[in-house]
Amino acid sequence: MQTALDKKYGQGKYHVADTTLGEFDGLRKAEEGNPVGVCAGPKAAIAASKIDSPIISMSTQWRGKAGNPYPYSGDKTELLDIGSEMDPCKTCALEENESIYVNKANEGVK
Ligand SMILES: [Zn+2]
């Protein structure tokens, strides 16, 4: 997949994450949330930690063919003009987990 992305978008533009964050990083599973580490967020945090650009926000986007099953329901929905923005799962939405993602993602910032 990395080779395909490099070929299509240029070397190093996108990074495939082959590892994820887990309980050993302090993540906690929320009741009715996904198991820790299975979502794109913790994997993206690791991929982001390998580049030196600051991470200024996170967004969960629905990429499926059918309609977005969990449309974003948080603050400032009026600012979003796209139907692909999703609510994170309950595990990813835990504040302590979000800050672990953000801290990891910004590890590479100089
Ligand atoms: Zn999640």
Image (cartoon, grey):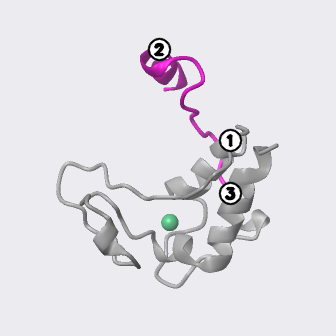
Q: Name the residue under label 3.
A: 21
Element type at marker 3? Answer: loop
Residue drawn at the location 68% of the way across and 69% of the way down: 99
Residue 22 at least partly seen: no
Q: Is residue 62 above or below residue 94?
A: above
- Label annotation for residue 53: 1
Quadrant the C terminus occupies = top right
Region of the chain picked out in magenta, as a range: 1-21
Q: Which of marks 2 and 3 is in front?
A: 2
- Corner quadrant of residue 29: bottom right
Element type at marker 2? Answer: helix
Amino acid type of disc 2? Lys
Residue drawn at the location 73% of the way across and 39% of the way down: 52
Q: Looking at this rendering, what residue extends furthest in the top direction?
A: 7
Q: Is residue 45 above or below residue 96?
A: above
- Mark 1 crowdedness (10 Å alpha carbons): few <14, some 14-19, many ≥20: some
Q: Where is residue 50 in the image (x, y as percent from the top left)?
A: 72, 39
Question: Which badge, 2 or 3, is on the more N-terminal residue?
Answer: 2
Verify whether residue 60 appears in magenta: no
- Find out whether the residues at labels 3 and 1 contact each other: C-beta distance under 8 Å: no
- Viewer-closest of 27 and 60: 60
Amino acid type of disc 3? Leu
Residue drawn at the location 37% of the way across and 55% of the way down: 61
Q: In this view, does 15 lie above or below 79?
A: above
Q: Where is residue 64 in the image (x, y as percent from the top left)?
A: 26, 50
- Label annotation for residue 62: none
